[in-house]
Image (cartoon, rainbow, N blue to C red):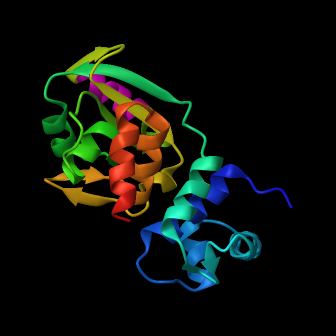
């Protein structure tokens, strides 16, 4: 059976974001995957010694596995916006911060040189209009990433801002490369 990347990432995100094991039914529901497919994927993870049923046995190895299958998002737009954090706090649109700014809110290792946010693909035009109203289009200090809405699973609020889950942040930091990898390693040690 072919294991599609997006479904696998959804399952891994839920497995790593929850503190307690979920039922297979609940896991597949939260990951928005068919139960039969979820059971098959769990068996594959179990063969690798990463899970037992739906219980994660080794979070660090599971994150390493996720890194091996992760594909960086290909849809994004950049903007130059004055005081983007204030804008994010006042918008009613759904989003989650990731990479530099999210890491700075979580552990304060990186300078938040750019603000990367995930948004729902169906909200793309609303975000584009909001950014144009408050800034300029083109390479700047804000990057809006349009991706699978499930990337927001496990989000939390820090200082009035929505932030991705720690497992998602680790994946995004490693994918960003450079100094972000060092910050990801520090987060991974604390998993």
Residue shown at 35% from the left, 14% from the top: 139
Magenta part of the protein: which range? 125-133
Left/right placement of residue 68 relative to residue 109 reads: right
Q: Which residue is nearer to you in this view: 165 or 120?
A: 165
Identify whether 48 is placed above or below 3: below
Q: Choose top left, top right, bottom left or bottom right for residue 12.
A: bottom right
Q: Which residue is nearer to you in this view: 38 or 93?
A: 38
Residue shown at 40% from the left, 78% from the top: 19
Q: Quadrant of the C terminus?
A: bottom left
Residue shown at 55% from the left, 37% from the top: 72
Left/right placement of residue 1 relative to residue 188 reads: right
Q: Which residue is nearer to you in this view: 154 or 184?
A: 184
Left/right placement of residue 153 relative to residue 62 reads: left
Q: Is residue 75 visible?
A: yes
Q: Magenta region's main secondary structure?
A: helix
Residue 36 image offset from top left, x and y in percent: 76, 75
Residue 14 image offset from top left, x and y in percent: 51, 67
Residue 103 image offset from top left, x and y in percent: 28, 46
Q: Choose top left, top right, bottom left or bottom right for residue 180.
A: top left
Identify whether 111 is placed above or below 151: above
Left/right placement of residue 5 relative to residue 121 reads: right
126 is within the stretch colored magenta: yes
129 is within the stretch colored magenta: yes
Residue shown at 16% from the left, 43% from the top: 90
């Amino acid at each position: 059976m072919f294991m599609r990347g997006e479904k696998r990432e959804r399952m891994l995100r839920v497995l790593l974001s929850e503190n307690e094991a979920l039922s297979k039914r609940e896991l597949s529901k939260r990951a928005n995957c068919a139960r039969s497919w979820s059971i098959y994927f769990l068996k594959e993870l179990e063969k690798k010694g990463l899970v037992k049923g739906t219980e994660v046995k080794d979070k660090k190895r599971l994150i390493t596995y996720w890194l091996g299958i992760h594909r960086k998002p290909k849809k994004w737009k950049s903007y130059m916006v004055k005081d983007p954090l204030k804008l994010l706090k006042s918008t009613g649109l759904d989003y989650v911060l990731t990479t530099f700014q999210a890491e700075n809110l979580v552990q304060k290792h990186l300078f938040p040189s750019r603000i990367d946010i995930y948004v729902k693909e169906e909200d793309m035009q609303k975000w584009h209009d909001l950014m144009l109203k408050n800034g300029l289009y083109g390479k700047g200090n804000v990057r809006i990433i349009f991706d699978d809405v499930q990337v927001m699973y496990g989000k939390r609020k820090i200082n009035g801002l929505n932030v991705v889950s720690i497992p998602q942040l680790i994946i995004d930091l490693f994918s960003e490369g450079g100094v972000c990898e060092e910050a990801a390693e520090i987060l991974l040690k604390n998993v």
